[in-house]
């Protein structure tokens, strides 16, 4: 599937209510990046990350935003992409 919504051409984003507290005072771009990560984990999982975070065990771009998705569907966030 495509990450673009065919009807509107807009990116699929999770609602702001899904964001972790630590991004509530960040710039809109940071909040949108986290909202995109929540709504499109498979897209980010397919993108390598080049920020040097491989040293901390990250395998792809999603790892900079989400540490894990628990069996119940709740998310443990990673604050690496915060800054």
Image (cartoon, rainbow, N blue to C red):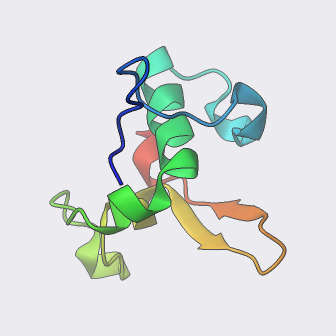
Residue 50 percent coordinates (x, y): 15, 60
Residue 2, placed above or below residue 28: below
- In the rendering, at what x and y percent does residue 62 appear? 41, 62
Please tell me which residue lies in front, 77 or 37. 37
Q: Residue at x 78, y 81 (%)?
A: 71
In the displayed image of the protein, which residue is found farthest to the right?
Answer: 72
Q: Is 59 placed left or right of 11 in the picture?
A: left
Q: Residue furthest left?
A: 50
- Residue shown at the point (79%, 63%) measured from the top left: 74
Residue 20 appears in which quarter of the rendering?
top right
Q: Residue at x 45, y 54 (%)?
A: 80
Q: Residue furthest front?
A: 7
> Which quarter of the figure is the C terminus placed in?
top left
- Answer with left or right where residue 29 lies relative to residue 26: left
Which image quadrant: the N terminus?
Answer: bottom left
The relative height of residue 71 versus residue 13 in the rendered view (above or below) is below
Q: Residue at x 69, y 38 (%)?
A: 19
Occupied quadrant, residue 78? bottom right
| Viewer-proximal residue among 27 and 46 | 46
Question: For the image shown, how many numbered marks are present on the structure?
Answer: 0
Residue 38: x and y, percent? 57, 49
Closer-to-camera residue (22/45): 45
């Amino acid at each position: 599937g495509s990450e673009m919504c065919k009807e509107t051409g807009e990116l699929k984003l999770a609602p702001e209510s899904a964001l972790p507290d630590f991004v509530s005072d960040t710039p809109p771009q940071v909040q949108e990046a986290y909202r995109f990560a929540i709504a499109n984990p498979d897209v980010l999982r397919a993108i390598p990350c080049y920020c040097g975070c491989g040293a901390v065990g990250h395998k792809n771009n999603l790892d900079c935003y989400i540490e894990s998705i628990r069996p119940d569907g709740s998310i443990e966030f990673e604050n690496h992409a915060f800054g």
